[in-house]
Image (spheres, helix red, strand yellow):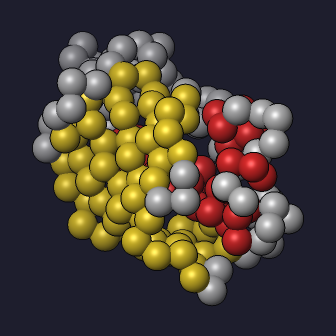
């Protein structure tokens, strides 16, 4: 059975937006473009009216790195890991992972208001309720913005 079979009649974006615990204005997922048991590719556009731009470098706003990491965690970590857990439990669990570690977070460029980014998550391992995923953020032109390896485990359902 393909992992997408557990999503049933909904598309991947709709299903994952219901499954992840973050809600607006702190959700940084617009679309899930690709999804299987090895990787996820999703996107987000940072709107010019995001709450964090007013106080972050006023007059010359840039997206805070902590928000970029959060976006990578939401798409490449939480959404993807929730999907993997759904497969592992035969479609029975909607639990979201609890973050335990971020390794090697590096930033290569900034993201400005209005920019759309792509986030790719690649499974390193998923076993015994623990997950480790390599995440990378790119511009739509393919320029690498950031990468990090995130780890977590599954506790109770939220």
Residue 75 percent across, percent down from the top left: 50, 45
Residue 87 x/y as whole percent: 70, 64
Which residue is painted at 67% across and 55% down in the image? 2
Q: At 75% across and 49% down in the image, what residue appears?
A: 5
* Residue sitting at the far front: 1
Q: Is residue 115 left or right of residue 91?
A: left
User: Measured along the vertical axis of the image, is residue 89 above or below residue 47?
Assistant: below
x and y percentages locating residue 139 in the rendered image: 26, 29
In the image, is 73 to the left or to the right of 20?
Answer: left
Please tell me whether residue 114 is drawn above or below residue 128 in the rendered image: above
* Residue ID at (61%, 68%): 98
Q: Nearer the viewer, residue 92 or 62?
A: 92
Q: Is residue 69 above or below residue 125?
A: above
Asked if residue 56 shows in the view, the reply is no
- Residue pushed farthest bottom? 128
52 relative to 107 in the view: left or right: right
Total residue callouts: 0
Pick the quarter of the image with the C terminus: bottom right
**Residue 8 seen in the figure:** yes
**Quadrant of the rendering where the N terminus is positioned:** bottom right
Residue 90 at x, y percent in the picture: 80, 67
Give left or right: position of 39 versus 130: left
Report which quarter residue 95 is drawn in: bottom right
């Amino acid at each position: 059975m393909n992992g997408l079979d557990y999503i049933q009649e909904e598309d991947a974006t709709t299903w994952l937006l219901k499954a992840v615990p973050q809600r607006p204005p702190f959700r940084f997922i617009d679309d899930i473009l690709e999804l299987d048991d090895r990787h996820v590719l999703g996107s987000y556009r940072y709107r010019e009216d995001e709450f964090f731009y007013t106080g972050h470098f006023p007059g010359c706003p840039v997206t805070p790195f902590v928000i970029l990491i959060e976006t990578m965690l939401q798409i490449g970590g939480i959404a993807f890991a929730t999907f993997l857990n759904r497969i592992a439990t035969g479609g029975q669990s909607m639990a979201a992972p609890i973050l335990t570690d971020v390794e090697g977070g590096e930033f290569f460029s900034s993201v400005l208001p209005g920019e759309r980014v792509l986030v790719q998550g690649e499974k390193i391992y998923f076993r015994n309720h623990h997950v480790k995923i390599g995440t990378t953020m790119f511009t739509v032109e393919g320029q690498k913005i950031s990468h990090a390896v995130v780890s977590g485990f599954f506790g109770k359902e939220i």
